[in-house]
Image: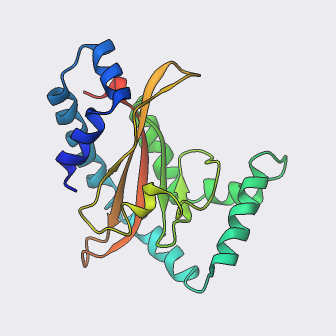
Amino acid sequence: MSLKSTIMAAVCALSMSSFIGVHAVSANEYEAELMAFAGDVKGWISDPVVIDAIKAQNAENAGLGQADIDALDAQWRAETSAASRPMIDEVLANDLSKFLMQKSEESEGLMTEIFVMDNKGLNVGQSGVTSDYWQGDEAKWQQTYSVGPDAVHFGEVELDESTQTYQSQLSLPVVDPADGSVVGAVTVGINVELLQ
């Protein structure tokens, strides 16, 4: 599915209709904003700090089986509510996470979260703590990494009850500019009310 058709499908969703109705923007305006945003994300996910971190983790985790992945995910989930969280802290302290935190801060609220995944769907770096470590069983990874370099996955636009803002997730494959291979994926949470 092309970026344009993916975006139009999202724009036609009931929740998007509510957003457009409340905020008096046209579907075409919203589509143009999303396409521009996706282009911006594609620009910075080719940065060496992103590519090198993913490739290093791909090599490190090459031998992991599903049982290993499940164990890592369970450890991560347990740490999200624990006082001690060595696994989470290690990921948040890496260079990629610092890069993603900076991108999120520079967006002034537009990017509500950013996380980068490896070729197994495991988090490599992130701007904040995610509820789980393995995304490989979710559409954000399955519809990007597994599809190819031109894939785009756009999640439904939903009203975030805590912030009363409309949010969605854009997911893209991460492509190594050196050879055009897909090495991982990225998901960016978007406050769609701030798109311009």
Residue at left 40%, top 43%? Answer: 155
Residue at left 19%, top 47%? Answer: 5
Above or below, 60 against 101 in this view is below
- The colour scheme used here is rainbow
> Residue lying farthest right?
83
Q: Seen in the image, is 48 located left or right of residue 78? A: left
Q: Position of residue 11 (x, y in %)?
A: 26, 33
Above or below, 97 against 51 in this view is above
Name the foreground residue: 45 vs 70. Answer: 70
Name the foreground residue: 127 vs 78. Answer: 78
Image quadrant assignment for residue 104? top left
The quadrant of the image that shows the C terminus is top left
Image quadrant assignment for residue 69? bottom right
Numbered label tally = 0
Above or below, 59 against 49 in this view is below
Q: Position of residue 161 (x, y in %)?
A: 56, 22
Q: Seen in the image, is 33 located left or right of residue 41? A: left
> Residue lying farthest bottom?
63
Residue at left 63%, top 81%? Answer: 65
Residue at left 17%, top 27%? Answer: 29
Q: Position of residue 51 (x, y in %)?
A: 39, 68
Q: Seen in the image, is 161 located left or right of residue 28? A: right
Q: Position of residue 82 (x, y in %)?
A: 83, 48
The quadrant of the image that shows the N terminus is bottom left
